[in-house]
Image (spheres, rainbow, N blue to C red):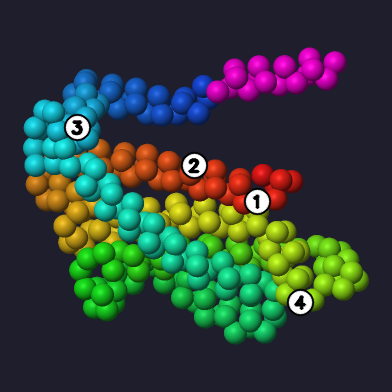
Amino acid sequence: MADRIASRSVSSRRRLDWLPFVLPAAVGLAWATLSYAGRVPEYLLPAPGQVAVTAADFVTGLWHCGPYSGTFIRHALASIERVALGFSLATVVGVPLGLLTGCSDAARRVLDLTVHSVRAIPGIGWLPIAMVWFGIGTPTTVFLIALAAFFPIYVNAALGARSVRPLWIRAAQMLGASRRDLFVTVIIPAALPTVADGLRLGLGISWAYLVLGELTGVPDGLGAVMMDARMMGYVQIILVAMLSIAILGRLSDLALMALLRRLLPPRFA
């Protein structure tokens, strides 16, 4: 009986596997209909076929369709490096501070007011001062990414540490656990699922702020491609760069989830 129920559950999941593709297919169909029917000018929204050819040339360079032919790898690697640096910096700072804030009332009173006040400043508000501090280039982009990713990572780490069941803490104390042992063996493992959610949020925000940082005049990167293409009127390249960021962002999220599954306790994986 249990095997029959399990097989039904598996077959049901297989039947639903196509559902994630319904919305992209509907958007693609609407896009193709509007473009090929002439309802939208090409300079505003190129046809899907044009975008597909431009994307293939952007990656392979076989058609030599313009100045971006075959440059995808160079721009993608530059963007990935900036996201990796900014996200890593936000993680290294945000996770320990968040856990500390969640465990210590004194740390929360010292840090929370400042962190949440700074969090209210929009990312675009940091751009002018970041350019003054770091100039135009990778440091400004990494700073903006790290700053934006820090807040969800910090907030979720603090929430995870505060959400540990008091019963677990009392049980560990009754067994003679020191404050260090309590932090390492109880609080961190219990907080990991919430920390993982914060890391995923921070990584997604990192890709959004990548574009903001690369619009400042850096020589390479997918955001720089978008800005240059806008100035030259290559709308199809703008769309291709946007799709590239979406795909790279999704792949990085899958990679992060695979890593977190190996780190999370089995009951949370």
Residue labelled with disc 2: 254
Residue 60, horizontal then vertical, whole percent: 19, 32
Position above or below: 192 against 239: below
Residue 183, horizontal then vertical, whole percent: 72, 70
Position above or below: 83 against 24: below
User: Between marks 4 and 2, how big is the CA–CA gap?
Assistant: 35 Å
Q: Secondary structure at mark 3?
A: helix
Quarter the C terminus occupies: top right
Residue labelled with disc 4: 179
User: Between marks 2 and 1, how big is the CA–CA gap?
Assistant: 15 Å
Query: Along the horizontal axis of the image, is 268 left or right of 64?
Result: right
Q: Nearer the viewer, residue 176 or 219?
A: 176
First-in-chain label (4 vs 3): 3
Query: Along the horizontal axis of the image, is 185 left or right of 152?
Result: right
Name the kind of residue labelled 2 in the image: Leu
Check whether the beta carbons of the residues at disc 1 and disc 3 lie within 8 A of each other: no
Quarter the N terminus occupies: top right
Q: Which residues are magenta?
A: 1-17
First-in-chain label (4 vs 2): 4
Residue labelled with disc 3: 60
Q: Residue at x 35, y 69 (%)?
A: 143
The answer to whether residue 47 shows anywhere in this view is: no
Q: Nearer the viewer, residue 61 or 230?
A: 61
Q: Residue at x 46, y 54 (%)?
A: 203
Q: Quadrant of residue 147?
A: bottom left
